[in-house]
Each structure stands twice: as structure tokens, then as C-alpha cells.
Amino acid sequence: MRFSEADGSSGPLIDAYGNDGILIGGRRFTRGLIVTPNRVEEGWGPAHPADLTVEHLDALIAIEPETQVIVLGTGETQVFPDPALYFAVIGRGVGFEVMDTGAACRTYNILMSEGRRVVAGLLPWR
């Protein structure tokens, strides 16, 4: 899916997503990545959502210590992580939303454009 009329003045917006990757600023990413209003970092996350660990989530928080909410995209379908992972994030006072990667891309763009301190951890579409 391609987004239209996105305003990236507050940081990188996700332009499109799908089977061939995630498009941000004309660059296509095909591996897991972290997206924040300040940066894009490729090579994040496990190969499969079921393999997500606390360390993966710690990396999301560490990249932006003032994060208000983490948006986790689990690929083509929504896959809920182990409840212990929720508690690890929520216990730090950070919101945690889990959804398929398409919904996570859309949610990230909305929250970022509202000026929220958001970090997206996006697993590839498989």
C-alpha cells in the first residue's frame, strides 16, 4: 500500500509497505527495522514474531529513551508476543501496541505527525 500526501517535516514517514518491503524516503527496506522521528535503523528483530525477546524490545526503548509508545508490526498478520514482554515494556511506563506491519506503518505515521514520541519496530511482510 502506498500513502499519499504525507508530510515528513517532523521526521521520516513510511511511504509504502507490502511484500517487497517498506519504503521510507525513497529507500526500500526488506529486513526488520526500527523507525523513530529521528532515525531509521535496519537489521532489528527476529526472523519470526514468535521469537521476539525482551532484548528486542529493550533495543526499541534504548534508541529513544523518551519514548511514549512502541508500535510493533509483526509482519503480514498480527502475532501477540508472550505476555511477559508486555509487562517488561508497560512496567517502564511506555505504551505498547501490537499489530500487523501494515497497521503499524499507518499508526506510526499518524502518531509521528501528531508529535508523539513513538518508536516502531517493524518485522518484514512474510
Image (spheres, helix red, strand yellow):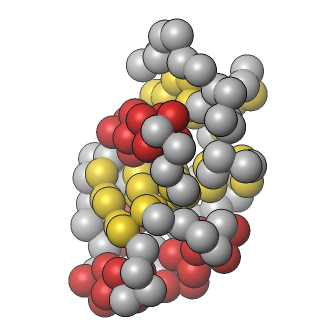
Quadrant for the N terminus, please: top left
Quadrant for the C terminus, please: top left
Does residue 101 lie above or below 4 as drawn? below
Q: What x and y, as percent, mark residue 119? A: 54, 57
Does residue 17 lie above or below 47 as drawn? above
Say whether residue 92 is left or right of residue 100: right
Q: What x and y, as percent, mark residue 60? A: 59, 69
Q: How many marks?
A: 0
Q: What x and y, as percent, mark residue 94? A: 42, 74
Does residue 15 lie above or below 70 as drawn? above
Q: What x and y, as percent, mark residue 86? A: 32, 80
Say whether residue 77 is left or right of residue 43: left
Among the 4 quarters of the image, the one containing residue 52: bottom left
Does residue 13 lie above or below 63 as drawn? above
Say whether residue 112 is left or right of residue 65: left
Q: Residue furthest top?
A: 5
Whether residue 126 is visible here, answered yes or no, is no
Q: Residue at x 52, y 75 (%)?
A: 57
As rendered, which of 105 and 38 lies closer to the eye? 38
As rendered, which of 17 and 37 lies closer to the eye? 37
Q: Residue at x 69, y 68 (%)?
A: 63
Among the 4 quarters of the image, the one containing residue 67: bottom right
Whether residue 117 is visible here, answered yes or no, is yes
Q: Residue at x 37, y 89 (%)?
A: 91
